[in-house]
Image: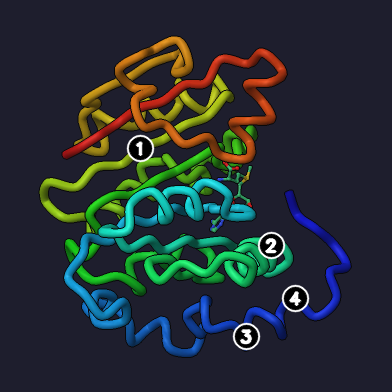
Amino acid sequence: MRLRNVTGSREVIAESRFVVPEETLKEMPGKWKELFGNQHPIHIEIGMGKGQFLHAMAKDHPSINYVGIEKYSTVLLRAVQKMEQEELPNLKFIRMDAEEIAEVFGAGEVARIYLNFSDPWPKDRHAKRRLPSREFLARYDRILAADGRIEFKTDNRALFDFAVEELEPAGWQAKAITYDLHADPVLMEGNVMTEYEEKFSAMGNPICKYVITR
Ligand code: SAM
């Protein structure tokens, strides 16, 4: 996913009106609705990649505000370019490491969190870096509304099994779980494919998904 040698991606991002400036992020808790200029709920995707999923979601759901979070400017650049081609008023981006997410959104400010095809970090010693780990669940707990939920999709069965095992010790519960999303008519309703979902399902990999709440 990391695209190297994309000249000037940091500069393009720093100047883009679609990206919330890094230097203002620490002032943002409690101010996201003001930024969008309405009271619509805020849904975020962490590890958005090139933004295919979130752009489609924002287009399909104009009464939801979406924020995409991506660590690498070279990848985020692709999402910014898509917005330049087709601008949407209800979609903004942040370039940051999600470890700092609880310093950027206020308590209960986010109504839903999407994790799609998160990096697996297969070594045990890197488990804390996995986006569905208990350490990250504790961060999400701080920013998610009381009735908020997290939706996680992946084709990586080992990562998914890990994510499911993290739920109970972290105080979360699964509202829905499937090990073959594309064969599940209920969970497939309204499903928007991510870039990685298209790629891996075309290879025949089943897609796992959970929906969790506290
Ligand atoms: N969600 C997209 C999809 O399903 O097509 C992209 C999946 S890609 C495998 C994972 C993305 O998450 C990469 O672009 C990576 O840079 C980003 N990422 C991984 N860890 C992150 C973190 N701690 N904070 C922000 N972004 C992260």
Say what amino acid the circle numbered 3 marks. Answer: Ala
In screen coordinates, is 211 left or right of 69? left
Distance from Cα at disc 2 to Cα at disc 4: 9 Å
In screen coordinates, is 66 left or right of 182? left
Mark 1 or mark 2, earlier in chain: 2
Say what amino acid the circle numbered 4 marks. Answer: Ser
Residue of label 1: 151
Q: Position of residue 60 (x, y in %)?
A: 39, 48
Distance from Cα at disc 1 to Cα at disc 2: 23 Å
Residue of label 4: 9
Say what amino acid the circle numbered 2 marks. Answer: Arg
Q: Secondary structure at mark 1?
A: strand
Disc marking residue 14: 3
Q: Is mark 1 within 8 Å of ligand 1?
A: no
Asked where in the image residue 186 lies, by quadrant, the reply is: top left
Q: Position of residue 73 (x, y in %)?
A: 68, 69
Mark 3 or mark 1, earlier in chain: 3
Mark 1 or mark 4, earlier in chain: 4
In the image, residue 30 sits, relative to residue 138, either above or below, namely below
Mark 3 or mark 2, earlier in chain: 3
Residue located 57% across and 65% down the image: 86
Asked where in the image residue 67 lies, by quadrant, the reply is: bottom left
Disc marking residue 78: 2
Distance from Cα at disc 3 to Cα at disc 4: 9 Å
Distance from Cα at disc 1 to Cα at disc 4: 30 Å
